[in-house]
Amino acid sequence: MSVEVQDPSANSQAAAKSDIIVRRRLLSDRLQLIALSLGPLVAAILVASLILIAMGVDPVAYYTYIVNRGLLSPSGIEATLTRMGPLLLIAAGLIVAFRAGIWNLGGDAQFLLGAVVVAALAPVLTAYMPVWLVLIVTLIVGAIIGALWSLVPALLRARQGVNEIITTMMMSFLGISLSNVLVKIFFLDPATNVPQTRTLPVEDRLPRLFDTTISSGVLIGLVAILVVHYVMAKTAFGLKLRIVGANAKAAVHAGLSVSALTIGVFAISAGFSGLSGAIAVLGQYGNVRADWNPAYTLTIVPLVFLARFNGFATIAYVFLFSVLSIGSESAARRLGVPNYFTLVTMAILLILLGITEMLDQKRRESRRT
Amino acid sequence: MTLLTAAFLTALLAGAITAGIPLLLAGLGEQLSEKTGVLNIGIEGMMLAGAYMGFLVAWKTDSVFLGFVGGAGGGMLVAAIMALLCVRFGLNQIVIGIALTLGAEGATAMLHYFQFAQTYPRLGAIASLPIPPLANIPVLGPALFNRPPIVYIALLLVAVFAYVYRKTYWGIALQAAGDKPAALDSSGVSVLGIRSVAVLLTGALVGLGGAFMAIVGAGIFVPFMTNGNGFIGIVLAMLARGRPLWVLGGAAMFGACLSLTTALQVAGVDIPTDVIQMLPFAAVMGVLVMLGRKANLPSALGAAYVRGAR
Amino acid sequence: MTLSSQPADDAKPLVSLKSITKRFPGIVANDSISIDFFPGEVHVLLGENGAGKSTLVSMLSGLQQPSEGSIMVDGTEMPIASPQKALALGIGTVFQHSMLVPSLTLTDNVNLGGAWWKTPDREAIATRMEETARSIGVEVNPTAITSSLSLGEQQQAEIVRALMRGSRFLILDEATAMLTPKDAEKLGQLMRRLVAQGLAVIFITHKLNEAVAYGDRISVLRLGRKVGALGPDELKSLGPEAATKEIIRLMFGSNGNQAAVTAKADGAMRPRINGAGTGAAPVLEILALEVDDDSVPVSGIELKIGAGEIVGIAGIDGNGQKQLAEALAGQRPVKNGRIYLDGQPIEDLPIGARRHRGLRYVTDDRLGEGTVGAFPVSINLLLKQIGEAPFWRSGIEQGGAIADNARKQVKDYDIRTPDIETPAGKLSGGNIQKLLLARELTGSARAVIFAKPTYGLDLNNIAASRRRIREAADGGKAVIVLSTELDELIELSDRIAVMSQGRIVGIVENDGDARQKIGEFMSGVAA
């Protein structure tokens, strides 16, 4: 940000000085932000360590193992990065929704339906078109399916003001059951006894990165979240959404079409969830089994909140979460600490982050006195 | 129509009650919180804590009664964290609610892993308390009037809450806390106190519902066994708004559909259970689409109360 | 001073403030204030917005604690730690904003605070409420749902409730702000009846005439300090006119006096623009306008406003002014009728298109809808031009152009802000109003609607806002000013329309006896 001097009598020295002050303030703001994010993380690991000690597990060994398995070992980091793809896409959708003040809590069904339809469609399409085209078509289809599943809550909210927390949750339960019905009745793979869709051959899936097993889904996820970050921060469309979220009355007053924007937000947000489902199938699983529901949305919601809807911070949190969950899956098998421990760690982290934020607010208020 | 035998209908109705009671308790609990302006997204976690504690105590003490007390206590324990963080400290109710749900899921699953994962102990069948003349009615009797006392208590709670909301000073204060907390405060009633008590009682009710699932419904604790029942409770409470009787109606409908899935399976009908599980949600969505009425929630719902802040 | 102004040796104050100071982050709201309140007196606390009246009230009612000083009740020091404590001491407060729960009946609002395990005897309470109301000469319907009552009725119910709770010290905070002149007068008489029964009544207001009309004793606050007081003897001996002059001197000091006087003089001298109103084609023309609303449907609005003309719309708050303004701006659908801007119908156009044609709306809900508090000043200045060049190109934000625009507006409109990136919500009310004026008055405005343009502002900002309105008219724009302050309309307008219950009940030329005619129109329908 350059400081342009309006008043010709003001000398450039003053301008330079104020520039330095602004920069210094920005720097200290940033440092504070990092401290505010890292402090609770360290505290959460400490609290979680105490629990581990109570369980008779050496926390140092546990976390070393997790870092080794989730981050440092080749197969671990590959699994971590692959897992990030769908999570980042869900996060991207949630950022858009939450920025606009819309509680799309129906991500699980949007994800699953996208996944199921894509899983059913892709093996069929491979007979008719080249792989790259199949991938593009199915990714688009996944996004559309997700968006469609949010249409009813979107219309109800935009037209009649019906609370979307209720409707998206209902549609989520409905959609999870529907995707099971689809898998069990309509898209069943006749070749196996397990109720699941036909499996997409590995060579027909999303390409892997370099010589690893990392799915290129993670790239799509990263691009999505960066695009969302840029659009929200720098474009007129993003600003409009933020105004709707920050003050819907002001949006009406300013002449924004709140109902059209609302429907748009639902479509984008749910579209990302559907796309996420498509990528999980095309990049990772290759099929959908009956009763499969990773229920990612509920874990990503608080992460996005804690990142304060910032794209980069979200990437960091999603990365952290992926390392933790991949690492702890191995730890469950090896160290006898059940996988569920990750959930407890997450809960502690969320609560501590919430408390930190509250304390920070109090501190800022008292500093103004 | 060989399906519609007396035995089938009895099983269906009994199953509806068994599936509906936890939903009823969850819905009544959430309704209480929402009435005072607290959007309690954490009830799924409170329910799981209740299920775990209920099972643990019932199994250790061999007392169903103590089991239910333990279940209510387990729910209250999680609710106490919510009351402290969201009511006292004013933290974001949705973030903390989800955090508590995740935490309770993880904690109960882990405790289960260490305690029961090798042995999978089961509780025995629960003694029923037949209500003499009514219990002899065919179909209705065994399904409704020959049940464990907790079933009657849960149904009685509907009337109790209807009475409390409409007839007592407390009911008035609850409504004021959600609708215009500043008015309640200026009348000398502690808004934070009313809300804290409501959240704690929500925990007890919801915990009881969880304990019911473990002790009466399944006879065993399984990780994640509440399986979204808490969230359905939230939906019921939002649809019923302030009316306990509507929660009962909703719980009955959802319970019946859940029960129908099992009953049909038992009867050997080849429909995936998921189809029937979709019915209640589809029905409610259909009603919402047709009526399109605004979900008229308390005006202070979700907002922390800070005296003097506008 | 307190000692000398006591009415008699035997009268003891019911409540005394001893050197009360209250600090908030960044400001001192009350600075060492000492006041005695006596039973049987209406004690007026008079002061401008921001003088510290509300803070004083919130300390007396137990909502806040003084930073320094003490409160004495019946001669003993008595910290009022909570609203409950205040009620127990017999201090009842009727706040400016209703403290009744809208979804409950009046009876149940009386029941707030009852022992939780008990069941209220609603009939007995309703009877007692009716009796109490009758004893002070008002009528209430205890079984009515609060939200169905008018603000005046709600206020009476609150006074009755305070008495039922045993209040002997009744605080009425800006009680007349929302009332019709007739209701305000009724309230004045009610206050007289209450003190006749031995109560102490504290009446907080910023309206001079009410203070002089109903007060036995007046304390004047200014910028957090008590700057003077008039006891009963002084009030009597001075007479209304001299008392008013003395109070003005206290309230505004020498500067303020100047400002008030110039404002008055300006109003009287406002020149009529030739051809305004009649003859030339109107800029803004409203024909048989009808607007739907649940509480106040608007109908039959006919207005023509010429270039350079200011038409005032008078009326008590909530008589359809807001609905009319929003319908004109496009925020609310028009049910029937037409709106012409420069001869073109605009009633079907969306908000943005109306703005492009030159219609502007300066809202009175400055924080609620006028600005996004968390967003920077620079963005708030462009809130109605999002996506337009040169500030956005192909939908992408152009930081330089946005900042340039902001710096220019901040300078032109004298918006006092630390930085153009400062969140708009952090500015003072006056500067937020300047921001809105900057946004609405720049560019090719043809017709401007000002809703309560000086509401809640201090004197300097009031003067600045009124100057902008006059400048807008002088620049050839058609201007509508909606206001509840009659003085303001008389100062600014060429013609004044009176609105009541969603209709325009009369339009008067702003000449010598406009005030009286407007009063007649207002009370004629208000009855």
Image (cartoon, rainbow, N blue to C red):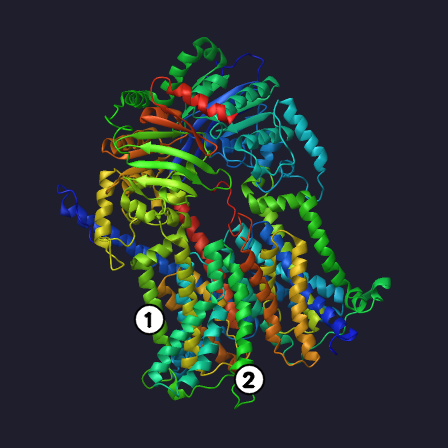
Q: Indicate the position of residue B255 as horizontal and vertical percent values.
A: 67, 66
Residue at 64 percent across and 75 percent down: it is B115
Density class for disc 1 (Cα within 10 Å; few <14, some 14-19, many ≥20) is: some
Out of C244 and B100, give the one closest to the viewer. C244
> Would residue C323 be found to the left or right of residue B225 on screen?
left
- The type of residue carrying mark 1 is Val
Residue B62, relative to residue C91: is it above or below?
Answer: below
Task: Name the mark nearer the viewer: 1 or 2.
Answer: 2
Q: Quadrant of residue C510?
A: top left
Residue C460, relative to residue B264: is it above or below?
Answer: above
Q: Mark on residue A47?
A: none
Q: Indicate the position of residue A177 as horizontal and vertical percent values.
A: 56, 73
- Which chain letter matches label 2? A
- The type of residue carrying mark 2 is Pro
Q: Is residue C419 visible?
A: no
Q: Mark on residue A195?
A: 2
Q: Which residue lies most toward the bottom here?
A: A191
Q: Mark on residue A223?
A: 1
Residue C387, relative to residue A113: is it above or below?
Answer: above
